[in-house]
Amino acid sequence: MPKAELHLHIEGTLEPSLAFALAERNGVVLPFATEEELRAAYSFTDLQSFLDLYYALMAVLRTEDDFADLADAYLARARRQGVRHAEIFFDPQAHTARGVPVGTVVDGLTRALDAAPRRHGITTRLIMCFLRDEGPEAALATFESARPYLDRIAAVGLDSAEVGHPPAAFREVYRRAREAGLKCVAHAGEEGPPAYVWEALDVLGVDRVDHGVRSMEDPELVARLAADQVPLTVCPLSNLRLRVVDRLADHPLPAMLEAGLLVTVNSDDPAYFGGYVDDNFTAVRDALGLDAETLRTLARNSFRASFLDEETRARYL
Ligand code: HPA
Ligand code: ZN
C-alpha cells in the first residue's frame, strides 16, 4: 500500500551491519565486538535508555559519504515497505558536538535525497530537529549555523529527552524558523504530559505533533486536535519498545481514530525498534485487529498530513 513516512530519524535507521562497516571505514572502535553483541544492547526500558545507545552509535557517522550511504540504505528499505514520500528528521547537534560540520551532514543527506526520485521512486523532505535537552540557546545557535542550508530544509522539529524540557522554551527559534518560511513540528506527548502538546500547539505553533499519544489523557486537547485536524505522527513499535505502552494491544491508536484525530503510522527509529513502517502497519493490524479500510485510512492520512504541495498530495488521495 503506497504511504508516506513522516516520523523517521535518519540516525535511527543505522542498522548494526552498516554501523560496523562505517566503524571499519572510519577507524572508529565501537564498544561492541560483534553485531550480535550490539543487538543484545537493544533492550530499552524508556526513552533515555534508547537515546544513550542512539547517540553512542552515531560515532561512526563522520563523512559526507557516511550520511549519503545511511540515507540511501533507508530509502531502499522504505520503498520495499511501500513508502512513496518520506519526511526525514536529522539531529545536527548530535554531529556538530563530535566535530562533524552541519554542512557535511546536509550535503551527504541531500545527495541521497536528491537521487531518491530516480533511484527509489521516493520524494522527500528534510526536517532539522533541535535536541531539547541541550536547551533553547543551543537550538538558536544551531538554527543560525544552518541558515546557509535552509533552502534544503522544509521544517524544524524538536526531539530527544522530553520530560523536563517543555516546548515553550523554544518559542524564539520556532519564530525564526517560521519567519524563514519553514514548517514546524515537535515531539510532544510521547513520555511528556498533555500540557507539552498544548505548548507545542499554542506557543510553537506546530503544523504537526510527533507522537502525541498522551494527548488522549486530556479530553479538551483531543477536541482541539480533532477540530483543527492537527496531524499526529504515531509510532506504535517505538511506543512498545520504549514502554510508552506495555502491550501493543493496549495502544491508543484505535481510540485516537475513533476520536476523529488525523493519525499516521510511522517507524521512528526502525533499526532500533524492530520494524520499518509497513512492519508497524502489520503489527497494529494484528495486535489491534484493524480492518483493511482502517489501514487504507491510515495510509491516506499520511499523505494528507504531509508537506507535499496540494496537487501532488491529491494524486495519492
Ligand atoms: N523521541 C525523542 N527523541 C528521539 C526519538 C524519539 O522517539 N527518536 C530519536 N530521537
Ligand atoms: Zn521520534
Image (tube, grey):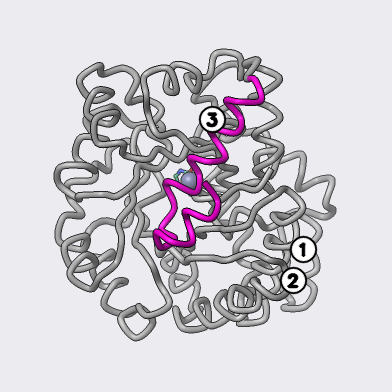
The magenta-colored residue range is 291-317
Residue under circle 3? 239
Q: Position of residue 287 (x, y in %)?
A: 67, 17
Whether label 2 touches label 1, CB < 8 Å: yes
Q: Residue at x 72, y 78 (%)?
A: 26
Q: Which residue is mark 2?
A: 22
Q: Nearer the viewer, mark 1 or mark 3?
A: 3
Main SS of residues in magenta:
helix
Q: CA distance from mark 1 to mark 3?
A: 25 Å
Amino acid under disc 2? Leu
Find residue 18 and name its label.
1
Q: Are marks 3 and 2 in contact (CB under 8 Å)?
A: no
What is the secondary structure assignment of the residue under circle 1? helix
- Apparent side of residue 255 relative to residue 180 in the rendered image (left or right): right
Label 3 crowd (10 A; few <14 / some 14-19 / many >=20): many
Position of 67 compared to 30: left or right? left
Nearer-N-terminus badge (1/3): 1
Q: Position of residue 64 (x, y in %)?
A: 61, 82
Q: Quadrant of residue 65?
A: bottom right
| Residue 215, x across and y down, in percent | 32, 25
Disc 1 packing (10 Å; few <14; some 14–19; many ≥20): some
Query: In the image shown, does 157 or 220 lie closer to the viewer?
Result: 220
**Mark identifier at residue 256:** none
